[in-house]
Amino acid sequence: MKTVLRVAVVAFVIASAWGVPKEEAKTDEDVTQELIRESIAKYPGTCPCPYNIDRAGHKCGRRSAYSRPGGYSPLCFASDVTKEMVEEYRKRHKQ
């Protein structure tokens, strides 16, 4: 009986080690998209970016926070994300 229990425990430990896939490192593009998603999610209104749709179903366009000077400056495009932002994200998430 002890042998069966030991074998079961060893099998469980081995299965646990192999069964849990490690999270793959995110590419710079993945991090950039995540930063854009986070930025848009933090915006309190309905028009953070020009390509978003307002409550009436219209594109936000020039009415978006991104297009208006002052106030909120959400990240809407990959070109808005700097290498420093990507590096800071990686530090925060230990990648």
Image (cartoon, helix red, strand yellow):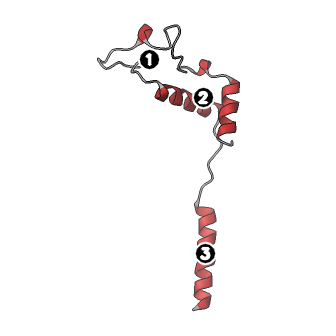
In the picture shown, does residue 23 fall above or below 33? below
Between disc 2 and disc 3, the foreground one is 2
Q: Which quarter of the picture shows residue 8?
A: bottom right
Q: Which residue is mark 2?
A: 32
Give the percent coordinates (x, y) of residue 60.
40, 13
Structural distance between the alpha carbons of marks 2 and 3 = 40 Å
Which sits earlier in the primary sequence, circle 1 or circle 3?
3
Q: Which quarter of the picture shows residue 88?
A: top right
Q: Do labels 2 and 3 touch, CB within 8 Å? A: no
Residue shown at 41%/18% (left/top)?
47
Mark 2: which amino acid?
Thr
The quadrant in which the N terminus is found is: bottom right
Mark 1: which amino acid?
Tyr
Give the percent coordinates (x, y) of residue 65.
47, 14
Tell which of 23 and 64 is nearer to you: 64
In this rendering, position of residue 83 left or right of residue 69: right
In the picture shown, does residue 56 fall above or below 42? above
Residue shown at 64%/41% (left/top)?
93
Which sits earlier in the primary sequence, circle 2 or circle 1?
2
* SS for dot 2: helix
Tell which of 61 and 91 is nearer to you: 91
In the picture shown, does residue 91 fall above or below 21? above
In the picture shown, does residue 24 fall above or below 76? below
Q: How many numbered badges does the structure rendering display? A: 3
Q: Which residue is mark 3?
A: 11
* SS for dot 3: helix
Which sits earlier in the primary sequence, circle 2 or circle 3?
3
Give the percent coordinates (x, y) of residue 17.
63, 64
Name, please, the residue furthest toward the front. Answer: 71
Q: Which residue is mark 1?
A: 51
